[in-house]
Amino acid sequence: MLALAAPPVAAQRPRNAAATYTLPPDQTTPVKLRQPAPERLRAFRQQREFQYVEVKSEQSSWELLWRHFWQWVSDLLETRPGKLVWEYGIYAGLVAALVFVVLKLMQVDITRAFGRSPRPGALAYDVQAEDIHGQDFDALLAAAEAESNYRLAVRLGYLHVLKQLADQNLIRWQPDKTNHDYLFELPAGPLPEAFQELTRQFDYVWYGELDDITPTHYAQARATRLAFQQLLHSGRRAA
Amino acid sequence: MENNLIPGMPAPNAEGIQPAAQPNHDAPAAAPFTSRTDLSHLARHADAIRQELGKVIVGQQALAELLLTAILADGHVLLEGVPGVAKTLTAKLLSRTLEVPFSRLQFTPDLMPSDVLGTSVFRPNKAEFEFRPGPIFASVVLIDEINRAPAKTQSALFEVMEERQVTQDGTRYTVPEPFMVLATQNPIEQEGTYRLPEAQLDRFLFKLNVGYPTVEEEIAILQGHHTGFGGTPLEAVRAVLTATDLKGLREQVRRQHVEPKLLEYIARVVGQTRAHKGLYLGASPRASLALLNGAKALAALRGRDFVTPEDIQYLAAPVLRHRIQLTPEREMEGHTADDIVKQILQQIEVPR
């Protein structure tokens, strides 16, 4: 059955198989050879784009110097001590890179190690802490009182008290702390209550911008401060 | 030694202690170290509100103080906490203490902006469109579960929260004065919540975290509910502050003294959020204003007519925590926005 169904082999040839034809050469049209104009050819040859042979420029004295330098380094490294330096230099470089990466990860500012000033922060203003330990409060207070600048005098007197408290290790001076933080640091006894009153007066005068403070008012603030300082002094003597 | 001879001052005694000041007729009659502004009216109202809230809310004194601060500072508040810590109840009670129009919105995922702001409806008898104001047109608007609505609905609040007005079909409609949005939300890690857009978060004066009560407080809550409040909790609270009173108190808060160095301090604290390595997004100048206004209100509540650095430090976290975004590294390390704010405060010198 299958054999009967199969078509004859001739019938399997592609029906559209075309015969191959070749065109005869055109003998009728004469070949006309066109040559470019010599001037045009010359102009092209002078253009940089058509200069296929690269002319090596002569080395400058600077390049020669560098060449000699690297040659010298190469010769040096070829020697026995040079090879040693080269070998250990690689290790030293790797260790230095490792240390640098660790310091970077720990966010350590290594510029300080070289005696340089720390990098400026992103803020455009001064964030330097006030150094209460470097101030001559007696002189500054006397000057402020002499000028009748009582508001400033109250401030200086308060800073002086903070310095004394820090000197006696009754508070831990830190610029970011508020006056009330220091109040909570004081040990139990008469000091906290007295310091609270002193702080209250300072707050009203300094933060409350009491510019019109009279001599009588200042006398009151000064008396509170001196009483506190005396309390502090007697406490130290008792200790 | 200090110079004890000060012009106009009594001489100190032998121990260096200044004697009590003599009466000086040139000096002002008021005590030297007391507020120059009379804040007793404000203190009375604040105490009355605290008292009313305390009838139902156990503990949470700090929360009550910050809510009062926000009212006086004319700001909106976002209360965040896990379910069941009385966020909504606190907001409802607070609104009840104010004698002003109140409305409540329950934010859901299918809520539309027009459901909040209002919409124009056609009146056939007049043959024209008429604007029907939405629930946002009230003095105290409680938005419950604010982060359950998608960003489209959240955006509807941008204009009204900042500019106190709604623009519809080219017409501006002003919301009543005072205007305050009290919103509650579950932490964003909770199921079915969306993170609020930064622009909207920035419009909240404070984000207050409502935590769990202590054991003693929880026992007191149970006792209160067991014995009853003499009705529902809301009935126990009465209005103690009118809109006119509130306007006067806010005016008083606006006139609070702020030492110029403290303005610089606020700018430094907020500025540092933009330079901090652990932060991907810093706080805006609106945050500086929020910190200033909040500090002025808090100082008034604490009986002072001037701001101190404590006020600023106390409010730094509530003002900044929702306005800053931590870098992914810091979040993975387990840091919170409050930790970063604390670090920033430690980096900046307190002016004195």
Image: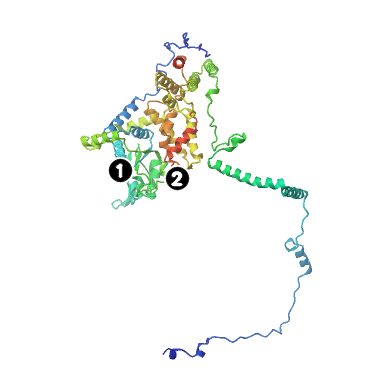
Q: Is residue B133 visible?
A: no
Q: Residues within 10 Å of mark 2 (few under 14, many from 20)?
A: few
Which residue is label 1 attached to? B104
Q: What is the x, y in percent for residue B226? A: 21, 36
- First reached walking from the N terminus: tag 1 or tag 2: 1
Mark 1 element type:
strand
Q: In the depicted view, which residue is nearer to us: B161 or B327?
A: B327
Q: CB under 8 Å between callouts 1 and 2? A: no
Q: Position of residue B208 (x, y in %)?
A: 37, 38
Q: The disc numbered 2 marks a residue on which chain? A: B
Count of labels in the image: 2
Circle 2: residue type: Met
Q: Position of residue B129 (x, y in %)?
A: 33, 50
**Residue farthest toward the top in the current orientation of the protein:** B14
Query: How does the figure colour the protein chain or chains?
Result: rainbow
Q: Position of residue B4 (x, y in %)?
A: 50, 12
Residue type, label 1:
Arg
Q: Is residue B335 visible?
A: yes
- Say which mark, if any, is on residue B332: 2
Q: Is residue B125 above or below residue A141?
A: below
A203 on left or right of B133: right
In the rendered structure, find residue B299 and report the number of the disc placed on it: none
In space, the residues marked 1 and 2 are separated at their CA atoms by: 37 Å
Closest to the observer, A128 or A46: A128
- In terms of secondary structure, where does tag 2 sit? helix
